Amino acid sequence: MASFGEELKRQRELRGINLREIADATKISNYANDTCLAQFATYVGIDYARSRYQYLHIVPTQESWTRDNDRDIVCVAFEENATITGSIAGRAQ
């Protein structure tokens, strides 16, 4: 039976993904996370740790990064299991 690491490697190779792509994607994701977290309190009006809202980030895919020179990072704030109407900017919740 293959180890967990061996199975990850096999799956990565089946998909044609090299380690450099994973490292680059991880760096972009970490940068996006840090950027969104840093901007959260300014936008929402309260520190993330005290807020009712959560956030996620959307980053370019490897394909759009290469083909379209896509460098946009989008931060999305939301409340789980809730419908929000309008902006949450400055709500301080």
Image (cartoon, rainbow, N blue to C red):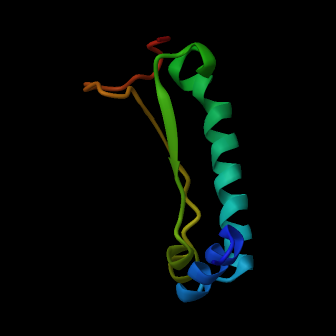
Q: Is residue 47 visible?
A: no
- Placement of 84 over or under 33, stated as above or below: above
Q: Residue 71 placed where, x, y %?
A: 59, 64
| Residue 16 left/right relative to 21 | left
Q: Nearer the viewer, residue 23 or 7?
A: 7
Residue at 56 percent of width and 79 percent of height: 11
Residue at 69 percent of width and 61 percent of height: 26
Residue at 45 percent of width and 22 percent of height: 89
Q: Residue 62 placed where, x, y %?
A: 56, 75
- Placement of 77 over or under 53, stated as above or below: below
Give the image quarter of residue 48. top right
Q: Nearer the viewer, residue 38 or 78?
A: 78
Q: Nearer the viewer, residue 13 or 57?
A: 13
Residue at 25 percent of width and 25 percent of height: 85
State the count of labels. 0
- Placement of 4 over or under 77, stated as above or below: below
Q: Residue 18 placed where, x, y %?
A: 68, 83
Q: Is residue 49 visible?
A: yes
Q: Residue 87 placed where, x, y %?
A: 36, 26
Question: Which quadrant holds the N terminus?
Answer: bottom right
| Residue 35 left/right relative to 80 | right
